Image: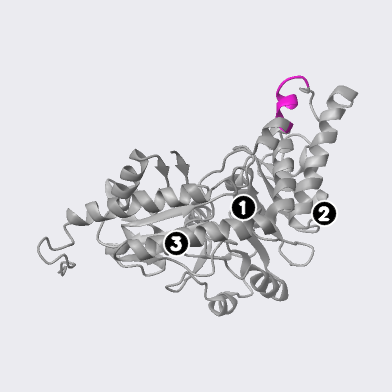
Amino acid sequence: MNVYLDNNATTRVAPEVVEAMLPLLADLYGNPSSMHSFGGQVGTQVQRARDQLAALIGADPVEVVFTSGGSESDNMAIRGTLMSMDGRKRHIITTRVEHPAVRGVFQHLGKTGYRVTEIPVDSDGALDVDMLENAISSDTALVSVMWANNETGVIFPIERIARICKERGVVFHTDAVQAVGKLPIDLSRTPIDLLSLSGHKLHAPKGIGALFVRKGAKMVPLIIGGHQEGGRRAGTENAASIVGLGVAAELAASQIQTENREVRRLRDRLQQGILKSCKDAVLNGKHRLPNTLNVSFKYIEGESILLMLDEVGISASSGSACASGALEPSHVLRAMGVPFTAAHGSIRFSLSRYTTQAEIDYVLEKLPPIVDRLREISPFIDDESGKPVELTL
């Protein structure tokens, strides 16, 4: 059996999405910006996709700008906004647990003269919103906070933060890549200025995303050239993928409540099974996306768990990454204060609408023996007593 539980990394393209895209990869190859009817019929489909995506997030279709994905949308929102201000304000605020697509931009801006404030999270992954509010000053240009964390699934109070920024006259951007299609979003009721999303996280293809730009928001385009996307993002539209994203958005809108109920049930079944059957397994994060489970297996390496899971056909991901030749724990788990011996053994399981109970039960059959085997050879566990070894630094 092959079990895919890495849906926060990417998702299977829905069959309905593939079916909708195929004509645009074959016979309907006209340029959507052309004046003739052959291109016009493609332009009509692009507009329909814009309408479908706008309906999912409660936006006006003219506020939807298609991009190549989440990273471009984040860069476009943050850098484009700051460029429009001509350096008049030099303070920007984010969190310590952002995706690299935002974190990397803020680190770069910090090297170019911007003052960066990173708001911490607590041991449950929750954001200190009061600290964020107190950090805003007359020099604050922009606040960027993710809607839901990609590693732990922890959901941030975006509506509250948006209202605070609105009251203080500060531009607010949210990276909603993990939230769109999983959580109900209505931008007509929430004063968010800019919102990033990515198609391949909601069963559309890779290489397509969008940026919501509220009417009146000032932003300098990063890609200059043609008139596409209302002059906000030049370049011939990726029509096939845009149409695919539109269909994926419509599917998400129609299934979000049912899917969340069933996906959450399977996630909770997996969570309860792991915590019951695996010794020293600890849950990371509270108030999470319904599809996400991040567990630390104390005293063993997450990479070893992943390799052994892969051998039995199970795909998941680790909260650790290899950097500079040394294994470094996830910056998210470090920000949450997860101990070293737990952070290195963190595994993220992320489900989708295609996950089945049989697959979850298969994981619960295969995972505990793997954990037991790795504990037997762990240098952090005493061979005779089976208890953790006291570490001295």
Residue 60, which numbered label? 2
Quadrant location of the N terminus in the rendered image: top left
Badge 1 vs badge 2, beta-carbon distance below 8 Å: no
Residue 257, which numbered label? none
Where is residue 237, by image quadrant? top right
What residue sits right under mark 1 in the picture? 79
Q: Nearer the viewer, mark 3 or mark 1?
A: 3
Report the amino acid beneath label 3: Gln
| Mark 3 or 1, nearer chain start | 1
Quadrant location of the C terminus in the rendered image: bottom left
What residue sits right under mark 3 in the picture? 271
Residue found at x 52% / y 76%: 128
Report the amino acid beneath label 2: Asp
Instruction: Find numbered disc 2 in the image and state the secondary structure of the residue it sits on.
Output: loop
Q: Label 3: few (<14), some or many (≥20) within 10 Å? A: many
- Between the C-alphas of marks 1 and 2, the distance is 23 Å
Residue found at x 82% / y 49%: 62
Instruction: Find numbered disc 3 in the image and state the secondary structure of the residue it sits on.
Output: helix
- Tell me which colouring the rendered structure shows: one colour
Q: In the depicted view, which residue is nearer to us: 11 or 236?
A: 11
Residue 14 shown left or right of residue 45 in the figure: left
What predominant SS class does the magenta segment belong to?
helix
Q: In the depicted view, which residue is nearer to us: 15 or 90?
A: 15
Report the amino acid beneath label 1: Arg
Q: Is residue 266 above or below residue 190?
A: above
Q: Specify the segment rendered in magenta.
A: 20-27
| Mark 2 or 3, nearer chain start | 2
Q: Nearer the viewer, mark 2 or mark 3?
A: 3
Q: Label 1: few (<14), some or many (≥20) within 10 Å? A: some
Q: Where residue 338 appears, x then y in whole percent?
A: 35, 67
